[in-house]
Image: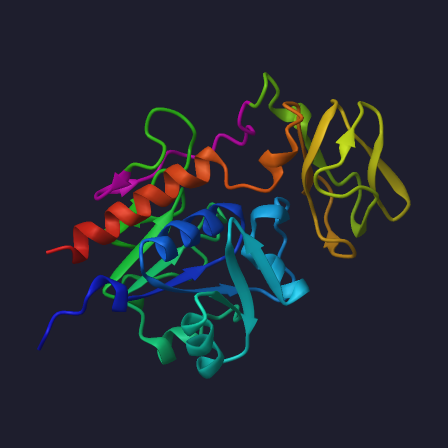
Amino acid sequence: MTEKRLKDRIILIKGGGEMASGVVLRLVRSGFRVCITEIPEPLAVRRGVSFCEAVFAGRKEIEGLVGKLVSGREEILRSWENGEAPVIIDPGCAIRKILSPDVVVDAILAKRNTGTALSDAPLVIGLGPGFRAGRDVHFVIETNRGHHLGRVIEEGEAEADTGIPGDIGGYTWERVLRAPVGGRFRGKKQIGDRIEEGEIVAEVEGVPLKASISGVLRGILHDGLPVVPNMKVADVDPRALRENCLTVSDKARAIAGGVLEAILIKYNH
């Protein structure tokens, strides 16, 4: 049997958040056919660079690539023909049995394995902690910032989650806004807006959420979603560069490079 060309290989990405979307961009630009699975109410904060936003809007364009909400196999094929990245609401990843992907990438970043198995595809890749290479997936990609970011792990696990947001402009905890109470989230600002320290960015059940630092609103949860106390709901970038809100981050690109490397290890004979 003739070996498939790389461009004929199908890659299924579980999750459409920022890191997953960086992976999608790199793989589509490298010629692969990529499909994204999502939940009905995605909780991505960096929605400006997350293809899961297509769940709410029908489409989402990031750096020239359109993510298109689809509902089945025929629409997925049509989306590929149009040069798009199809996004399907499929929490149980049932489309995997229909598409028979060559690669499954668990990019949910739940810090635990929510159901991905070695048998899901000839090549299964997990992003970050919660996976062990050789047990849950074939390869793990390091997601912690630092010297090993983007490294392909062929044995063992990624570094444990530190729980500390990445340092941007000298700020870590201060730049992340978290829900003060549980309930429905209501945003008061838009991604890219200039934010001043102490300004109200959102509210939950009438309880205001104020920015701890000044900068640009880099991300905010979709309006109307239910949240729980202390859940991350917004992100202020102290560098105040609006263009950073609408392009993939250095971290996402590094992780995407690791995923591409793992695919080539497997298939670039």
Can residue 133 be seen here? no
Of residues 66 and 227, which is closer to you in this image?
66
Can residue 62 be seen here? yes
Please indicate whether residue 102 sits to the left or right of residue 29 in the image: left
User: Residue 263: x, y in percent?
Assistant: 24, 53
User: Residue 154: x, y in percent?
Assistant: 21, 44
> Is 221 placed above or below 215 here?
below
Residue at the image position 54 percent from the left and 23 percent from the top: 167
Of residues 34 and 15, which is closer to you in this image?
34
| Quadrant holding the N terminus | bottom left
Is residue 166 within the magenta segment? yes
User: Residue 188: x, y in percent?
Assistant: 84, 43
Of residues 101 and 173, which is closer to you in this image?
101
- Classify residue 46 by image quadrant: top right
User: Residue 54: x, y in percent?
Assistant: 61, 62
Q: Which range is magenta?
A: 152-167
Residue at the image position 31 percent from the left and 54 percent from the top: 30
Which residue is outermost to the top? 170
| Quadrant holding the C terminus | bottom left
Please indicate whether residue 32 sits to the left or right of residue 112 in the image: left
Is residue 130 within the magenta segment? no
Residue at the image position 64 percent from the left and 45 percent from the top: 45
Residue at the image position 17 percent from the left and 58 percent from the top: 267
Which residue is outermost to the right? 206
- Classify residue 220 by image quadrant: top right
Please indicate whether residue 12 sits to the left or right of residue 39 in the image: left
> Is 75 placed above or below 56 here?
below
